């Protein structure tokens, strides 16, 4: 079966391509290389022994998207990662984010609907919950107004897919709301490769640990949490990638309960910023240079998943610990230097 992975050379996309190939799927990657490197293709191939089909394509170009689907009309399903993802950048340039994250989704859905088999997995986010009222967060938690244009594109994306499913009974979709993906493949052939200054905590930690960054800023230590720092649910990217394959198989096998479903993907455990730093110090056997600075605007205090639905309905569970993920991230960082 041929599966399309948009943004397939990105962090989560590349790990998902590996798991798809390991499960016997033929993979076609679309990526415009705006936030990814073509060398990731070599990393994927070195792990699986099989090079996926790669098409460099800007999904904002509607006619090119149409031409792609005419050529690859035998696609059985699509996993859609392609999106801009920096919260701060989205606040400064909202129109770019709405164009890149919403228009591209619509163009892919329009073409996918024309195919004989329409199975769609959407890369969503726990940002749709905002600061949830109750922890851990279940799929029934209310969707809050977005804290950023990036978060809003995930909410709007889910709305678009839900509306599409309502009027198209043959169109099947699952939105996967991830918490905080970290780590790298055990082979260290692929991992998180931020362009410029990292927006996420773990690559900033590893780059500070290796000497690329002078120090890590911890944004606030006066939050109402056990150690005063923000709490997040950090999930190993390989565990996350495996969940995409399981969700896709659910649709392909017709095991879905409705043609639009939503699942949280996390570990079910919250870890504070200081706990993540301590984990890094354990696995790297070195102290990290960091300092506490003022709170950052828009940060929620705490967010971690109730994974009961994914565990019971999908039959998926995160297997790796925080230390496992940090160890793989550190191993990956060391291969880059």
Image: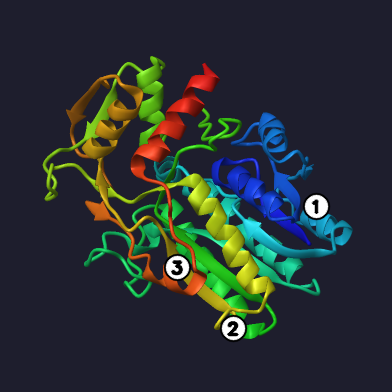
Residue 258, position in %: x, y?
A: 56, 83
Rendered view: 66 above or below 30: below
Residue at 76% x, 73% y: name it: 117
Q: CA distance from mark 3 to mark 2?
A: 23 Å
Determine whether the residue tagged by mark 3 lies in a helix, strand or loop. helix
Alpha-carbon distance for marks 1 and 2?
Answer: 27 Å
Q: Badge 3, how many Cα within 10 Å: few under 14, some, many 20+? A: many
Given this view, does label 3 or label 2 mark the residue nearer the observer? 3
* Left or right of 205 on screen, residue 182: right
Coordinates of residue 33 in the picture (x, y in percent): 67, 36
Q: Earlier in the sequence, mark 3 or mark 2?
A: 2
Is 202 positioned to the left or the right of 37 in the image? left
Q: Quadrant of the N terminus?
A: bottom right
Image coords of residue 32 (percent x, y) = 69, 41
> Can residue 166 be seen in this snapshot?
yes
The disc, 1 or 2, on the residue closer to the chain's N-terminal end is 1
Give the Cα separation between the discs numbered 1 and 3: 36 Å
Q: Which mark is residue 64?
A: 1
The disc placed on residue 166 is 2
**Nearer to us in this view, 284 or 290:** 284
Q: Which residue is mark 3?
A: 310
Q: Up-down: is 211 above or below 265?
A: above
């Amino acid at each position: 079966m041929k599966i399309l992975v948009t943004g397939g050379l990105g962090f989560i996309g590349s790990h998902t391509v590996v798991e798809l190939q390991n499960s016997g799927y033929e993979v076609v990657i679309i990526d415009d290389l705006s936030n990814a490197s073509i060398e990731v293709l070599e990393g994927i191939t070195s792990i699986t022994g099989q090079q996926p089909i790669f098409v460099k394509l800007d999904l904002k170009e509607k006619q090119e998207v149409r031409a792609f689907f005419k050529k690859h009309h035998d696609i059985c399903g699509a996993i859609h990662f392609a999106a801009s993802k920096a919260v701060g950048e989205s606040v400064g340039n909202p129109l770019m984010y709405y164009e890149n994250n919403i228009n591209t989704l619509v163009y892919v859905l329009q073409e996918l609907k024309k195919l004989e088999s329409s199975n769609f997995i959407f890369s969503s986010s726990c940002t749709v919950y905002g600061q949830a009222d109750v922890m851990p967060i279940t799929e029934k938690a209310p969707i809050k107004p977005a804290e950023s244009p990036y978060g809003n594109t995930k909410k709007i994306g889910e709305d678009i897919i839900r509306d599409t499913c309502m009027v198209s009974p043959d169109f099947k979709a699952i939105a996967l709301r991830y918490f905080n993906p970290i780590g790298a493949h055990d082979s260290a052939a692929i991992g998180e490769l931020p362009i410029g200054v990292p927006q996420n905590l773990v690559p900033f930690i590893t780059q500070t640990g290796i000497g690329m960054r002078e120090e890590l800023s911890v944004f606030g230590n006066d939050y109402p949490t056990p150690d005063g720092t923000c709490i997040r649910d950090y999930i190993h990217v390989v565990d996350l990638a495996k969940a995409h394959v399981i969700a896709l198989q659910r649709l392909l096998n017709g095991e879905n309960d409705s043609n639009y479903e939503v699942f949280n993907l996390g570990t079910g455990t919250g870890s504070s910023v200081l706990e993540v730093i301590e984990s890094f110090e354990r696995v790297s056997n070195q102290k990290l240079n960091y300092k506490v600075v003022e709170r950052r605007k828009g940060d929620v205090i705490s967010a971690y998943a109730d994974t009961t639905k994914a565990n019971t309905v999908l039959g998926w569970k995160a297997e790796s610990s925080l230390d496992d993920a940090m160890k793989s991230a550190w191993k990956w960082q060391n291969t880059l230097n």
